[in-house]
């Protein structure tokens, strides 16, 4: 039942390789036993879980509505009612409210439901949407006639979930996956015809590339990206010409990323070519070869141009500067900029729906660790902001009861200062006895911004600090922050996280074993690595769907993501990458140690992190555990990477995670 493998002179014996086969009844039996064991352990603090859950629910508006956004003659919005797990989607013309889609009705007989896309047709008469019924991230596409309320299409299955309409209601574009779960095809479907007759307009057979597509806000072009983490090939369909003709915009160049949009007579080019933090160029639609490209916004190192939203009268630039997200408006007529400023030192921004190309206002979301989600509207003609809506927090909540800080930890290599965003009680005494939940991710350039977090307030109300370590591997301080946390510099991610924890100790926020740590997916890799390196630091470890079986996964090209992930971790078929990955891979580096209490989670249908990864990790950790601390596994038997669907399930999960941390740290649980 064990497997022995030798590569580059290193022999590995995997005692738990058999766990990977979920068709094996013994594997299902094992997972059921693990769940029973975890449930029995958690039953000891059921009252605490119930208290946490009830506090969290009290702080959300169970009867909630999104702020309506305009699109043509309608305003669109969503509602959710008390007792419901899913949203209902509406629109309104004048005072006439119209129900478009009720996910509760669809999900009532489902154990899982997730919607990837929701697209209103150009005439506003049809609605296309894509649903996943088991957490596998494999979608079925539906089209509903909003005039009759009838489903007129449901034959497109095994799709990626991404959809967009053509120029009119006649055609719909969607994506397909290969047998490794990689999006690689784009199809054009004619409404009313059999999906077997759909036209394949694009295919990329390179296993390292993901194929994605989107329609410009101007409604004229669909851009198709065949992209990996290092380079892009971009093509387009001109919807004014031929909806089945694909034209290549730019061939692939090594280490060059491109994102293209449309503005009037020009294409807008967002690229990192000779610009690590990206720049903007334009080129005429009828002369888009590179010799015609004209620089509009030059590269400015340290000001990471993360994204751009293009409208007829303005462009909104999403940037990262000095560790914060920023918004900067650019006027393409007078070439002037306007910076939108925010008062708090740690906050999060997010995009709202801005559907209309000719708009003169821009909506976005703002929040901080103590400021509830707020819909803002920026007027590009007067350069003024106004607040449209503040998310109600109905339960006990006073922002003055909390203090938000951004502090900086010195890195051990002396090259950077690592930002830490935290929220603490107003009356917190900084004497080295505090308790902390420290969250981290640090991969793919994904930045975890310090927005409003209802569950975290229940921790802070119990005297905890909730902190986010903005470590290398994210893009918090620009593209180089990411690039120095991947490939052969991945150890920086783990060291930064540990250095953040030690800085919190040095500054007397906390002490060893009073720190619970939490991360999911690639953040679960972080949890595994830092637990192996410094087990005595942590009072509890929450590893959610953790990517911990790094070597075995990255050597198996039949798995989803593996080949595309070479651009993040390296290719272990090359000796330098194999040996480097082997040096930090959590599963491979478990030794006899006194591990802290650990909770790992997984999903049986997870296409991103196989269910066997947390399972094998837990079993091997127990083999090497030198203390009496529990090492637990919670496996969702009907869900995938995102866990169970529905909002109440989310809060139940968070309540259980936080109860585990509180129970552990508040018992002064010491590694023994």
Image: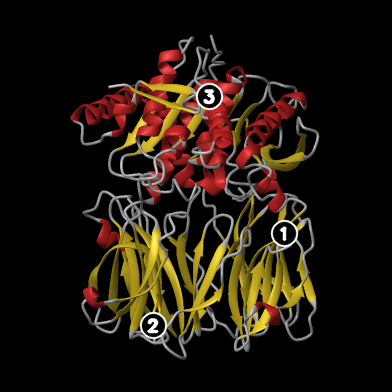
**Picture disc at residue 430:** none
Residue under the image location 42 percent in, 64 percent down: 204
SS label for mark 3: strand
Q: Is residue 253 above or below residue 456?
A: below
Q: Residues within 10 Å of mark 3 (few under 14, many from 20)?
A: many
Q: Estimate the x, y position of residue 454 in percent, counting from the top left.
A: 54, 46
Q: Is residue 44 above or below residue 570?
A: above
Q: Estimate the x, y position of residue 107 in percent, counting from the top left.
A: 27, 57
Q: Residue furthest front?
A: 9
Q: Is residue 255 left or right of residue 84?
A: right
SS label for mark 1: loop
Q: Quadrant of residue 293?
A: bottom right
Identify residue for label 3: 540
> From the viewer's perspective, is the residue at label 1 or at label 2 nearer?
2
Residue under the image location 42 percent in, 67 percent down: 78
Q: Estimate the x, y position of residue 301 in percent, counting from the top left.
A: 79, 58
Give the Cα separation between the discs numbered 2 and 3. Answer: 55 Å
Identify residue for label 2: 244
Q: Nearer the viewer, residue 217 or 465?
A: 217
Q: Residue furthest left?
A: 25
Q: Is residue 118 above or below residue 57?
A: below
Q: Nearer the viewer, residue 382 or 65?
A: 382
Identify residue for label 1: 277
The quadrant the N terminus occupies is top left
Q: Quadrant of residue 665?
A: top right
Question: Nearer the N terminus, badge 1 or badge 2?
Answer: 2
> From the viewer's perspective, is the residue at label 3 or at label 1 nearer?
1
SS label for mark 2: loop
Q: Estimate the x, y position of residue 73 in percent, counting from the top left.
A: 46, 87
Give the Cα separation between the discs numbered 3 and 1. Answer: 37 Å
Question: Nearer the N terminus, badge 3 or badge 1?
Answer: 1
Q: Quadrant of residue 121?
A: bottom left
């Amino acid at each position: 039942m064990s497997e022995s493998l030798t590569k580059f002179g290193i022999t590995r014996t995997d005692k738990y390789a058999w766990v990977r086969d979920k068709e094996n009844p013994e594997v299902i039996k094992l997972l059921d036993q693990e769940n029973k064991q975890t449930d029995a352990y958690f039953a000891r603090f059921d009252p605490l879980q119930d208290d946490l859950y009830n506090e969290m629910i009290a702080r959300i508006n169970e009867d909630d509505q999104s702020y309506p956004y305009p699109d043509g003659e309608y305003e669109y919005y969503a509602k959710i009612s008390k007792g419901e797990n899913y949203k209902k989607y509406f629109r309104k013309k004048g005072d006439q409210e119209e129900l478009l889609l009720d996910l509760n009705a669809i999900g009532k007989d489902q154990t899982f439901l997730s919607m990837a896309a929701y697209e209103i047709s150009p005439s506003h008469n049809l609605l296309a949407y894509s649903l996943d019924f088991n957490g596998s991230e494999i979608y079925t596409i539906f089209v509903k006639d909003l005039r009759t309320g009838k489903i007129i299409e449901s034959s497109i299955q095994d799709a990626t979930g991404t959809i967009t309409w053509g120029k009119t209601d006649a055609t719909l574009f969607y994506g397909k996956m290969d047998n490794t779960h990689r999006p690689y095809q784009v199809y054009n479907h004619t409404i009313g015809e059999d999906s077997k007759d759909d036209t394949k307009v694009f295919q990329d057979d390179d296993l390292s590339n993901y194929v994605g597509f989107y329609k410009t806000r101007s409604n004229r072009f669909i851009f198709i990206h065949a992209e990996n983490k290092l380079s892009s090939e971009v093509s387009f369909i001109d919807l004014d010409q031929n909806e089945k003709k694909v034209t290549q915009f730019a061939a692939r160049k090594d280490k060059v990323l491109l994102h293209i949009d449309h503005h009037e007579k020009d294409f807008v080019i967002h690229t990192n070519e000779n610009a690590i933090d990206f720049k903007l160029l334009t080129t005429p639609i009828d002369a888009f070869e590179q010799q015609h490209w004209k620089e509009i916004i030059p590269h400015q190192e340290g000001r990471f141009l993360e994204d751009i939203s293009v409208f007829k009268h303005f462009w909104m630039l999403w940037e990262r500067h000095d560790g914060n997200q920023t918004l900067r408006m650019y006027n393409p007529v007078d070439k002037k900029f306007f910076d939108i400023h925010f008062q708090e030192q740690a906050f999060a921004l997010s995009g709202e729906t801005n559907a209309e190309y000719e708009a003169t206002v821009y909506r976005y979301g703002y929040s901080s660790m103590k400021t509830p989600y707020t819909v803002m509207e920026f007027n590009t003609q007067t350069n003024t902001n106004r607040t449209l809506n503040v998310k109600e927090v109905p339960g006990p909540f006073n922002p003055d009861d909390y203090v938000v800080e951004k502090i900086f930890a010195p890195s051990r290599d002396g090259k950077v200062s690592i930002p830490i965003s935290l929220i603490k009680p107003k009356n917190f005494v900084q004497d080295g006895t505090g308790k902390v939940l420290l969250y981290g991710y640090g991969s793919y350039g994904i930045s975890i911004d310090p927005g409003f977090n209802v569950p975290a307030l229940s921790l802070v109300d119990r005297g905890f600090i909730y902190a986010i370590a903005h470590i290398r591997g994210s893009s918090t301080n620009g593209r180089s922050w990411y690039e120095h946390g991947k490939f052969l510099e991945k150890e920086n991610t783990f060291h930064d996280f540990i250095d953040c924890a030690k800085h919190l100790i040095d500054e007397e926020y906390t002490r060893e074993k009073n720190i619970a740590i939490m991360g999911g997916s690639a953040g679960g890799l972080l949890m595994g690595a830092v637990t192996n390196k410094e087990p005595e630091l942590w009072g509890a470890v929450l590893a959610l769907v953790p990517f911990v079986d790094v070597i075995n996964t990255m050597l198996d090209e039949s798995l989803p993501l593996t080949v595309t992930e070479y651009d993040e971790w390296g290719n272990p078929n090359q000796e330098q990458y194999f040996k480097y990955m082997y040096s930090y891979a959590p599963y491979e580096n478990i030794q006899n140690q006194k591990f802290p209490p650990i909770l790992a989670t997984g999903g049986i249908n997870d296409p991103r992190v196989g269910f066997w990864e947390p399972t094998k990790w837990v079993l091997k950790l127990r083999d090497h555990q030198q203390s009496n601390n529990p090492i637990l596994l919670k496996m969702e038997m009907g869900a995938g990477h995102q866990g169970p669907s529905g909002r109440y399930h989310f809060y139940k999960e968070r309540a259980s995670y936080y109860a585990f941390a509180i129970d552990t740290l508040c018992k002064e649980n010491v590694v023994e």
